[in-house]
């Protein structure tokens, strides 16, 4: 029966109520608290902060609860909330060299100054479902004695970056210096939240876009670049995770003030070299940075960042991961999910227009066929 | 619950008028002015995330949010109807963040936000139509690259657009585009009128109202100022034609409105009714009836309470 | 407009450098209406670079190309506004690429390819556009029934003939051709050359044709320019240059044609 749209307001209200009921689930089961999500589902929270482009773990945890664990929906909630916030200052660039490092590895050298720290990683775990976890679990404390963080936070000298060591030898360009030399550094930084996208896009704008990009999308593109759809011989130069300070320098004060710290993940990829017999060859680099502990994201991001440098490096552009417009237009899952899901909205007016035309065309063809048969029979 | 005009409660505390902050509204208004100054040209703007998803009208919503004021009367339609779920949702949103008066009567509205239709009731001087646009670029299907389409618009290189129409005629014997039918505005820019059926295109030509188009996800605003020439693309020997139906509206008898097809039962019985619910209701209020107006098994359509149906079930 | 004879193209001091590498250097000549000029030389001699500069698609480092336009009067091909140049390339100037796929839209039918040129300058009558397209398919000896087929389904020779037709449909005054018979097998080449010779003389076209194949040059060109390492080493009437080459490089080129 035709009741598709009448009483829409009532239907919407009922749908909201039903959803709230299902979100709560079985009433006899204790309700999940935002704090529990914040503590025990931290990686979900971190992903939502990264793609929601807002650093507030508690809000992100609330979004995860409200979205019933749907992280794309939670990202949307956080991003919509972000729109309502006034912008007070631009912070100074975060100094990841001064990071209080909880995890730091490099695949390019056996040993690096400051050492490697595995940190709290899934790597090297055996992916066997642990039923003990279902029964409740008290973790045994990690080996005492060694401090769990390294670097400046511990009063030690800041951990030098592997990439800087390579740069010192001239084996890799310093960031911000491409073929154009120093001029790159002087231009004002773009802002994707203020300016509409234009192409070609400069690297700062590309990286901003990738930083909030959907992890799955970047993962697939990075993967494709490793499998031959693009030129990449990547090595993980350095992967870091830990806390960094955020500082502002308000005009009213004239000096820097640290306003807090955030957890961040960073990846620097060393990628295929450029140069020739006459031009000093050096490695190129890809970069990934994210709020929270999002290692897979920053690894993928660095691969895609490198792929997108194809234009500046004069490489042939024939792989999807190198196609700037393709990558940057489709990386935002808030945009993507909106448009894909909008197909659920009524489209019957336009469908009707096509129906009318197709029926009329079919009638014409059939009429022609009938009259053709009649003519042949008469002959 | 379908009173013609309602005055909802005051603006919900905590929100700026219209939800967007004043700077954002100013930025959007500037974009609208640019768009009006260059009819049919797509003006890029730095769209904001809204509490609705992209694809669900954020462009239109940002336009309405920037232009609505306390004196306005606001109508929202989707597929021509005021009570489709998304129209309801958008109307409620604006009631919450502006306290503006809302209406279902086209004639009473100062601002009409729409998805996929232009109302049948002729628009008047002083009214503003706000369109929700998914893909603002009419050349997108012949040329996926933004860099190329920008150049084509700048240099008025629209040959490829007609190539598409030529191919339609060569293959199907007619132009096979039925909605989102491209138009040339003020003799200069080719524009997508949003996914309205081609039936509605003629309403844009020399209209007394202002028509503004918002694409939130693609971040473009464009406009047709009042009394602007708008011509649907065609060939001299294959001129632009609109849809026609064999019958009339089953409820009000109208022969000049766009009809929705409704499948009534498993036996495949069909009924055609005006897509514009206000137009249909107004005609019925004036005493016009159509051939199925007294059918009791479709009483929902005529606005009676569901109990009436249960009684007959 | 003056009725005195007037060169169609006036080339002065065209030089194109790629960084330190010379593409072509200091080329000057005039081309008159109805003339066919051949530019010959081995690969790397700079002929394609020169052609790019002459046809307005490649910006020279120095020098100028003057063209007597039907619509715009005397213009400087590289000095004029972008929309003017782009329009000329769709109307008065034809460009036939060595690879026909560079000059065609593979995803639309042959008829649409031909029609696009007309539609881009305002043709709006489907029947007339179609009739014109059929006429030109006949001129290049493509069967009329293929008007609704996609160029992907055409053989190489047929694609090339379609590309030529697309260029001629807007009645250009001058056509630039880059190795139009390259990549085609010998019998197909012969047929195409015959067609070209016929069309050029019937339509009174001016042509600048780049080729490494001296037989093609002899068949089509009135005059020749011989290029080596970016410079013109010899010019003159085709038969003179080929039968009595003066420059050692020309002599080398001519002598290296295999005798049939």
Image: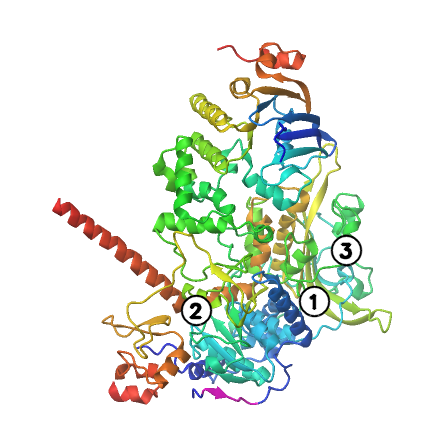
- Give residue A147's quadrant in the image: bottom right
Instruction: Tell me: A178 left or right of B138.
Output: right
Tell me residue A187's x, y (percent).
Answer: 77, 55
Tag count: 3
- Give residue A12's quadrant in the image: bottom left
Q: Quadrant of the N terminus of chain A?
A: bottom left
Residue B6 lies in the magenta-colored region: yes
Tell me residue A234's x, y (percent).
Answer: 64, 47
Spatial distance from mark 2 to mark 1, Cα to Cα?
A: 38 Å
Q: Which label's residue is closer to the chain start, 3 or 2?
A: 3
Tell me residue B208's x, y (percent).
Answer: 52, 72
Task: Determine which of the numbered discs, if any, sits on residue A187 in the image.
Answer: 3
- Give residue C244's quadrant in the image: top right
Q: Is residue A70 visible?
A: no
Above or below, comparing residue A284 to residue B96 in the picture: above
What residue is shown at x 19% (from left), y 51% (from top)? Answer: A371
Q: Secondary structure at mark 1?
A: strand
What residue is shown at x 54% (from left), y 39% (from top)? Answer: C91
Contact between marks 2 and 1 (CB within 8 A): the answer is: no
Residue C7 lies in the magenta-colored region: no
């Amino acid at each position: 029966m035709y009741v598709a749209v009448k009483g829409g307001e009532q239907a919407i209200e009922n749908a909201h109520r039903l959803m709230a009921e299902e979100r709560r689930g079985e009433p006899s089961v204790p309700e999940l608290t935002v704090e529990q999500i914040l503590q025990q589902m931290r990686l979900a929270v971190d992903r939502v902060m990264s793609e929601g482009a807002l650093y507030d773990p508690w809000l992100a945890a609330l979004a995860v609860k409200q979205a019933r664990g749907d992280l794309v929906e939670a990202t949307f909630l956080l991003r919509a909330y972000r729109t309502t916030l006034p912008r007070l200052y631009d912070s100074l660039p975060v100094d990841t060299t001064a990071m209080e490092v909880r995890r730091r590895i490099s695949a390019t050298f056996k040993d690096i100054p400051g050492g490697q720290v595995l940190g709290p990683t899934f790597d090297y775990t055996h992916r066997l479902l642990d039923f003990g976890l279902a029964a409740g679990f008290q973790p045994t404390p990690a080996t005492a004695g060694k401090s769990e963080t390294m670097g400046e936070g511990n009063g030690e000298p800041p951990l030098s970056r592997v990439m800087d060591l390579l740069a010192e030898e001239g084996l890799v360009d310093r960031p911000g210096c491409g073929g154009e030399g120093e001029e790159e550094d002087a231009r004002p930084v773009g802002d994707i939240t203020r300016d509409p996208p234009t192409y070609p896009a400069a690297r700062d704008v590309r990286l901003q876009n990738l930083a909030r990009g959907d992890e799955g999308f970047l993962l697939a593109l990075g993967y494709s670049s490793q499998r031959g759809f693009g030129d990449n011989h990547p090595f993980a130069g350095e992967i870091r995770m830990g806390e960094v300070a955020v500082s502002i320098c308000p005009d009213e004060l004239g000096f820097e003030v640290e306003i807090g710290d955030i957890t961040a993940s960073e990846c620097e990829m060393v990628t295929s070299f450029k140069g020739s017999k006459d031009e000093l060859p050096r490695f190129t680099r890809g970069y990934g940075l994210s709020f929270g502990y999002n290692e897979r994201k920053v690894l993928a991001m660095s691969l895609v960042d490198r792929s997108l440098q194809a234009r500046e490096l004069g490489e042939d552009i024939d792989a999807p991961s190198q196609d700037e417009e393709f990558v940057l237009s489709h990386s935002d899952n808030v945009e993507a999910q909106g448009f894909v899901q909008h197909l659920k909205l009524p489209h019957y007016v336009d469908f009707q227009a096509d129906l009318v035309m197709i029926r009329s065309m079919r009638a014409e063809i059939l009429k022609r066929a009938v009259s053709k048969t009649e003519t042949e029979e008469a002959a | 619950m379908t009173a013609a005009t309602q005055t909802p409660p005051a603006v919900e505390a905590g929100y700026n008028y219209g939800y967007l902050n004043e700077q954002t509204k100013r930025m959007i208004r500037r974009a609208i002015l640019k768009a009006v100054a260059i009819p049919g040209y797509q003006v890029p703007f730095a769209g904001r995330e809204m509490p609705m998803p992209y694809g669900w009208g954020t462009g239109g919503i940002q336009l309405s949010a920037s232009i609505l004021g306390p004196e306005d009367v606001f109508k929202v339609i989707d597929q021509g109807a005021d009570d489709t779920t998304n129209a309801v949702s958008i109307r409620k949103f604006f009631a919450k963040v502006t306290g503006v008066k809302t209406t279902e009567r086209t004639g009473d509205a100062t601002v009409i936000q729409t998805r996929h239709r232009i109302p049948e009731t002729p628009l008047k001087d002083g009214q503003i139509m706000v369109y929700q646009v998914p893909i603002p670029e009419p050349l997108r299907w012949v040329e996926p690259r933004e860099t190329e389409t920008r150049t084509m618009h700048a240099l008025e290189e629209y040959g490829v657009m007609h190539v598409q129409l030529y191919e339609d005629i060569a293959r199907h014997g007619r132009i096979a585009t039925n909605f989102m039918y491209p138009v040339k505005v003020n003799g200069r820019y080719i524009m997508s009128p949003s996914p309205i059926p081609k039936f509605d295109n003629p309403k844009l030509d020399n209209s007394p109202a202002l028509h503004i188009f918002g694409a939130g996800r693609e971040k473009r605003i464009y406009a047709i100022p009042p009394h602007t020439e708008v011509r649907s693309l065609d060939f001299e020997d294959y001129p632009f034609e609109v849809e026609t139906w064999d019958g009339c509206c089953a409820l009000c008898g109208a022969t000049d409105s766009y009809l929705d097809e409704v499948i009534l039962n498993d036996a495949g019985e069909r009924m055609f009714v005006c897509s514009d619910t206000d137009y249909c209701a107004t005609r019925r209020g004036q005493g016009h009836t159509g051939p199925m107006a007294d059918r009791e098994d479709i009483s929902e359509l005529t606005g009676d309470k569901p109990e009436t149906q249960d009684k007959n079930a | 407009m003056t009725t005195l004879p007037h060169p169609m193209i006036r080339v002065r001091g065209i030089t194109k450098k790629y960084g330190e590498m010379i593409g072509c250097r200091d080329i000057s000549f005039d081309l008159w209406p109805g003339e066919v000029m051949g530019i010959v030389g081995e690969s790397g001699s700079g002929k394609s670079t020169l052609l790019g500069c002459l046809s307005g698609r490649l910006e020279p480092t120095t020098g100028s190309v003057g063209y007597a336009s039907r619509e715009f009067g005397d213009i400087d091909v590289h000095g004029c506004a972008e929309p003017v140049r782009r329009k000329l390339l769709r109307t008065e100037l034809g460009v036939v690429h060595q690879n026909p796929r560079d000059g065609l839209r593979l995803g639309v039918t042959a008829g649409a390819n031909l029609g696009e040129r007309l539609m881009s300058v305002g043709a709006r009558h489907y029947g007339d556009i179609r009739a014109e397209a059929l006429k030109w398919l006949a001129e290049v000896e493509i069967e009329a029934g293929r008007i609704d087929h996609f160029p992907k389904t055409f053989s190489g020779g047929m694609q090339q003939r379609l590309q030529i037709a697309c260029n001629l449909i807007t009645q250009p005054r001058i056509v630039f051709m880059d190795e139009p018979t390259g990549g085609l097998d010998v019998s197909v080449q012969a047929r195409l050359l015959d067609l070209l010779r016929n069309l050029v003389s019937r339509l009174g076209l001016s042509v600048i044709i780049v080729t490494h194949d001296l037989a093609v040059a002899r068949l089509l060109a009135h005059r020749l320019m011989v290029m080596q390492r970016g410079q013109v080493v010899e010019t003159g009437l085709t038969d003179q240059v080929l039968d009595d080459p003066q420059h050692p490089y020309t002599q080398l080129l001519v002598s290296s044609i295999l005798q049939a």
